[in-house]
Amino acid sequence: MNKKKLHIKTYGCQMNVYDSGKMSDVLADQGFENSDQMEESDLIILNTCHIREKAAEKMYSDLGRIKKIKDKRTKNDKDTIIAVAGCVAQAEGQEIIKRAPIVDIVVGPQTYHRLPQMVTNAQKAHSKYGLELDFAAEEKFDSFPQIKSVEGSKTTQSSAFVSIQEGCDKFCTYCVVPYTRGAEFSRSVKDVENEIKKLLDQGIKEIYLLGQNVNAYHGRGFELDKWSLGRLIEHIAKMDEVKRIRYVTSHPRDVDDELIAAHRDIDKLMPFLHLPLQAGSDRILKEMNRQHTVEHYMKIIDKFRDARPDMAFSSDFIVGFPGETEEEFLGTMRAVEQVRYASTYSFIYSPRPGTPAATYEDTVSLEEKKDRLQRLQALINECGKEFNQNSVGKIMPIMFDRQSKKDGQIAGSSPYLQPVHIDTNEPEKYMNKIINVRIDKAFPNSLHGIVVE
Ligand code: 5AD
Ligand code: SF4
């Protein structure tokens, strides 16, 4: 049988990358194989992000381009099904079809397991579109274990994502996630364990646990008890073939002693934490409904550093939140100075429809917002460079898992998520292995090293 072609374009966070993998898995059973060519695909899925306005607008401009592809294929008697998945689908629903009538399927993040049926329906009656926006997280995960392939979860040959938690109950006033991803849901330990075992059978060494609020994890254990993230990590670390464990994204409010102890006691747990602070002013944090102060955050950082002195951190920051004064912005700069993050993401505040902050008076001019972003990014880059520079001379275990762009080099990741390159004409000797490397050069976004035999 001739396989049908599927092209998935993924926007946004790692959770979307993971979900795209799962979508291609469920559709493989229906005879679809992945293609990186949109033009030759029978089914095109846009797995979208709604976190900031730009991300959502990108989808609409891509749909304009896809319309041309579809028209050309129709002329050649070829059918093309267009699906919009992800957070824009959840947030805008039917509106998408009104604005872009070429769309056949709109499917929210909790109903991907129903995609095969929706695709069949669209194939049968092409003029009819499908819409699935339930919050059916439990049903979704329950239907995944039947899937044979885990290809979609892999990020490299050595590393794979495993979603353990979805959704958010925090309702930060600027954020759409609680509306697009629904309430917090944790998978059971058994489910997580089963997925990890399949990945290990395929040679995966690094498990990257995913959740919108990953450290709010409270999945069912083997009895009727609830396990925290720290306890889950301890359990996963007992599997011999697991060599490295990472997790993302955490909320300061959900950091507990078990997680800090896990960083102290478990070598396989990488000494790196993405812990968004968002703003360095208590008033702004309150307006954002973050439910903690800057001081509380700094105490958490200190506790991690006490437990694991080489712990590295990254954060997200929003500049130009409604009402943010220059002095409040300088609080953000001071917080970055204090933590000296290894890496950081920063964004201009983008009002999102339906969120409380979208109704707040926007007092900061666009010019000012851009200026603040520029100043913050200059500082962030300085900290990143400093962090990389401090790595020179150190010996680090590097997990090699990819070719470098440069000929004669391969690349891997340091425990602190830095890309590390080595020169070698025997890539197979090091690939998919963790090897000690002495770092000899630092660049703004990567390191270079020499293998320590
Ligand atoms: N505007 C700008 N940035 C936002 N983020 C979330 N919502 C918004 C918004 N409305 C940022 C936060 C979050 C990251 C994933 O995206 O910093 O941690
Ligand atoms: Fe959004 Fe806040 Fe939930 Fe993070 S914790 S997903 S920023 S609402």
Image (cartoon, helix red, strand yellow):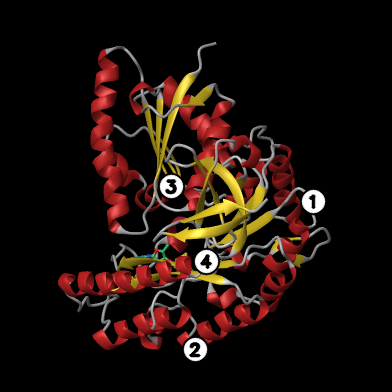
Q: Mark 4 points at which residue?
A: 391
Residue drawn at 60 percent across, 45 percent down: 140
Q: Nearer the viewer, residue 452 or 430?
A: 452
Dot placed on the residue nearer the N-terminal end, 1 or 2: 1
Q: Where is residue 372 in the image (x, y as percent from the top left)?
A: 25, 75
Residues at marks 1 and 2 touching, judged by CB atoms closer than 8 Å: no
Q: Nearer the viewer, residue 58 or 447?
A: 447
Q: Could you say whether the residue bearing mark 3 is in a helix, strand or loop?
A: helix
Above or below — where is 377 with respect to 65? below
Occupied quadrant, residue 208: bottom right
Q: Name the residue under label 3.
A: 86
Q: Name the residue under label 2.
A: 295
Report whether 393 appears left or right of 387.
Answer: right
Please tell me the numbered disc located at residue 240.
1
Which numbered mark, 1 or 2, is in the foreground of this view? 1
Which quadrant is the N terminus positioned in? Answer: top right
Q: Could you say whether the residue bearing mark 4 is in a helix, strand or loop?
A: loop
Residue drawn at 44 percent across, 37 percent down: 407
Which numbered mark, 1 or 3, is in the foreground of this view? 1
Dot placed on the residue nearer the N-terminal end, 2 or 4: 2
Could you give the CA–CA distance between mark 3 and mark 4, rounded to whole angstroms? 38 Å
Occupied quadrant, residue 250: bottom right
Q: Could you say whether the residue bearing mark 1 is in a helix, strand or loop?
A: loop
Dot placed on the residue nearer the N-terminal end, 1 or 3: 3
Dot placed on the residue nearer the N-terminal end, 4 or 1: 1
Could you give the CA–CA distance between mark 2 and mark 3, rounded to whole angstroms? 35 Å
Report whether 308 appears left or right of 107.
Answer: right
